[in-house]
Image: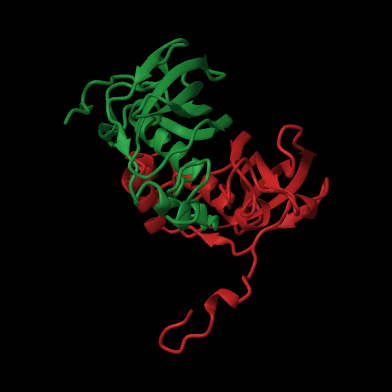
């Protein structure tokens, strides 16, 4: 049904995003899209929103007294961004985010640094209890503009199979 | 010898490496309600493209609840923030996390409270060197359900000598 001369919008094909379980293979390496320059605005917005009112993140004079050239970007923002950049490739069409292990903050990130993220498939199996669902584990590394690692971690997600019935009883689900 | 730096006057009196001991437990004083700023905001800010975090009609009828589900790392970041004054203010650097687990869904409007137990303290190699403090954190929803847990390691500064002059409390 259309109004005002609009065509049948429901007939438009969806521009699908994300990968299914069958799209992954062990040791596969994926360089994720976009990259992200983290600014002081990002750091201030994120740190204040999450109640991380720390001088190291928000008081440049204190940060300088500790030997830093600028405020230190909240490491949780680095971790969140590293995961965020990987979601379309790894978990957008997937299921619940099960956890993160072995997360190391390798070096500080400062306003103006640009991070980009790469992941390697380190484990994958189908779920015995949930047909049509796989469990995939990736090792993800984020590097700065010099190629130096800034954070590394292992992430595990449920991932829907191509002909899977999606996760649990969910009609449509994604929960990266 | 670690000398008192005037810049340290911005830090609280407590929270140096020496102030932590294994088994020490903390219920952090302030909880926070997850709104747009704490939930969908960070998910979009960090370019997490999963629309379940920012489309309020996407999960209608799902087992996770009808509304947007909060990005797990938004919750983890909020727990870090709520615990930060008591466990991170005197840090040299955050070293990392082990076993971050998302145990139950969080929705906008939920309130998250943070809890901490000190797991380990490892002095540095020489007397004034910063030491590593290991923490276990939990985030709990207003209905008593634990939604997040994780283990964190932080490199913590030692208390400078002559502390007292110029230090301030953290009340208010």
Q: Which residue of the protein is positioned furthest toward the left in this rendering?
A: B172
**Which chain identifier belongs to the green chain?**
B
> Which of B9/A77 is in front?
A77
Left or right relative to A72: residue B49: right
Left or right relative to A47: residue A23: right
Quadrant of the rendered image containing residue A88: bottom right
Measured along the vertical axis of the image, is residue B127 above or below residue A102?
A: above
Colour chain A appears in: red
Q: Which residue of the protein is positioned furthest toward the front in this rendering?
A: A1
Q: Which residue corresponds to the image point at 21% horizontal and 26% vertical from the top-left?
A: B169
Q: How many marks are shown on the rendered structure?
A: 0
Left or right relative to A107: residue B166: left
Q: Which residue corresponds to the image point at 74% horizontal and 56% vertical from the top-left?
A: A30
Q: Which residue of the protein is positioned furthest toward the bottom in this rendering?
A: A5
> Which of A105/A168 is in front?
A168
Q: Is residue B111 visible?
A: yes
Quadrant of the rendered image containing residue B138: top left
Measured along the vertical axis of the image, is residue A12 above or below residue A56?
A: below
């Amino acid at each position: 049904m259309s109004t005002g001369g609009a065509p049948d919008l429901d007939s438009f094909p969806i521009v699908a995003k994300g990968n299914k379980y069958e799209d992954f293979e062990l040791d596969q390496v994926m360089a994720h899209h976009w990259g992200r320059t983290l600014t002081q605005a990002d750091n201030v917005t994120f740190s204040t929103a999450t109640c991380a009112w720390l001088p190291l993140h928000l008081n440049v004079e204190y940060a300088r007294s500790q030997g830093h050239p600028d405020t230190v970007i909240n490491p949780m923002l680095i971790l969140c961004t590293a995961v965020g950049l990987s979601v379309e490739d790894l978990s957008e069409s997937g299921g619940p985010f099960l956890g993160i292990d072995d997360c190391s903050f390798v070096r500080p990130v400062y306003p103006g640094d640009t991070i980009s993220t790469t992941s390697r498939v380190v484990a994958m199996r189908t779920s015995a209890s949930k047909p049509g669902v796989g469990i995939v584990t990736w090792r993800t590394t984020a590097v700065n503009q010099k190629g130096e690692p800034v954070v590394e971690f292992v992430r595990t997600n449920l991932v829907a199979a191509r002909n899977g019935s999606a996760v649990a009883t969910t009609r449509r689900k994604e929960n990266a | 010898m670690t000398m008192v730096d005037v810049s340290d006057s911005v830090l609280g009196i407590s929270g140096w490496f020496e102030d932590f001991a294994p088994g020490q437990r903390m219920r952090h004083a302030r909880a926070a309600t997850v709104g747009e700023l704490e939930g969908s905001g960070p998910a979009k800010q960090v370019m997490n493209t999963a629309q379940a975090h920012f489309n309020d009609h996407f999960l209608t009828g799902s087992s996770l609840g009808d509304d947007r589900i909060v990005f797990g790392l938004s919750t983890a970041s909020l727990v870090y923030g709520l615990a930060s004054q008591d466990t991170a203010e005197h840090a040299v650097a955050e070293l990392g996390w082990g076993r971050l687990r998302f145990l139950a869904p969080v929705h906008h409007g939920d309130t998250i409270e943070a809890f901490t137990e000190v797991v380990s303290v490892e002095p540095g190699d020489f007397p004034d060197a910063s030491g590593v403090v290991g923490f276990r954190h939990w985030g709990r929803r207003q209905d008593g359900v634990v939604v997040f847990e994780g283990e964190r390691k932080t490199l913590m500064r030692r208390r400078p000598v002559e502390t007292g002059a110029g230090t301030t409390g953290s009340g208010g």
